[in-house]
Image: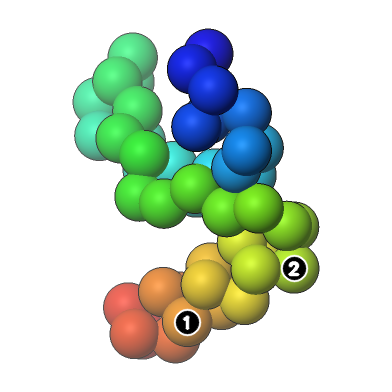
Amino acid sequence: MTYSEKLKPWAIVRLVYPTQWVIIGRYRSRSDAEGHLQLLRHRIR
């Protein structure tokens, strides 16, 4: 884990294949990650 990854411990990931994950975004706080996740879910609908 790099220094910049340690500064942003929360991440939103997407499962692409059964064994491959893609990082959508990294966030400093859980509330920021949850807020962005809500926005993504709202756009998908």
Tell me residue 20's x, y (percent): 29, 20
Q: Amino acid at mark 1?
A: Leu
Query: Which residue has dot 2 on it?
Result: 31
Q: Residues within 10 Å of mark 1 (few under 14, many from 20)?
A: few
Tell me residue 11's x, y (percent): 54, 44
Q: Residues within 10 Å of mark 2 (few under 14, many from 20)?
A: few
28 lies above or below 43: above
Q: Residue furthest left?
A: 17
For image coordinates 49% across by 17% down, the residue present is 2
Q: Earlier in the sequence, mark 2 or mark 1?
A: 2
Q: Disc 2 vs disc 1: which is toward the camera?
A: 2
Tell me residue 9's x, y (percent): 65, 37
Q: Amino acid at mark 2?
A: Ser
Q: CA distance from mark 2 to mark 1?
A: 12 Å
Q: Nearer the viewer, residue 20 or 6?
A: 6
45 lies above or below 5: below
For image coordinates 32% across by 78% down, the residue present is 44
Q: Which of the 4 image quadrants contains residue 35?
A: bottom right
Query: Which residue has dot 1 on it?
Result: 39
Tell me residue 4's x, y (percent): 50, 32
Q: Is residue 19 left or right of residue 30?
A: left
